[in-house]
Image (cartoon, grey):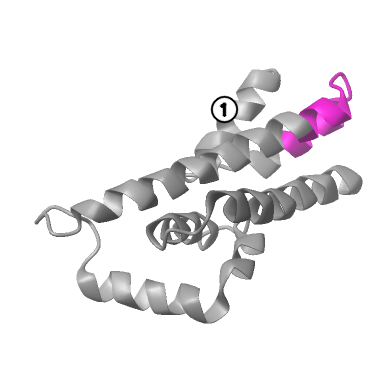
Amino acid sequence: MGYLSLFTISFLAATILPLSSELMLATMLSVESYNRTLLILFSSLGNILGSVFNWVIGFYFIKLQDKKWFPFKEKQISKSSLWFEKYGKWSLLFAWVPVIGDPLTFVAGSMKTKFLTFIILVSVGKIARYLFISLLI
């Protein structure tokens, strides 16, 4: 296990795959043979890029909503859009929250949230989470 493994798990955990980057980070922090700063950097970067992947899918995939195989129906898209409009871009600070964070980043892409706004808010939330975890260990 190394920094690249942590990066990969963190990336995949930010998609719809049920993985725990927090558990892997905590384990690696407790081993103490890894650099704490690099662990936070690799886990944060992987998780942020996983959210960017979701945003890109939402940004471009939404164009295919008229296809029969498209996973979201018009009603679901409208409902998610209203929710995102109601709580706004600031909800992206909670993109790290399990279960709701991944769809939130997808919706942000489908709602055409500006990428710079997206990346800043998602990064703040995710880096803060990993910093908090590192302080607990």
- For residue 38, which quarter of the picture? top right
Image position, residue 101 (x, y; %): 54, 58
Relative to 108, residue 53 above or below:
above
Q: Is residue 58 left or right of residue 45?
A: left
Residue 17 visible somewhere in the drawing? no
Image position, residue 14 (x, y; %): 53, 45
| Residue lying at 79% horizontally and 52% vertically, measured from the top left | 128
Assign the N terminus to one quadrant of the image: top right
| Residue lying at 87% horizontally and 30% vertically, measured from the top left | 36
| Residue lying at 47% horizontally and 60% vertically, measured from the top left | 108
Residue 118 visible somewhere in the drawing? yes
| Magenta highlight on residue 33 | yes
Assign the C terminus to one quadrant of the image: top right
| Residue lying at 83% horizontally and 32% vertically, measured from the top left | 29
Q: Is residue 55 left or right of residue 74?
A: right
Q: Is residue 32 left or right of residue 111?
A: right
Residue bearing mark 1: 8
Image position, residue 45 (x, y; %): 66, 34
Q: Which residues are magenta?
A: 24-40
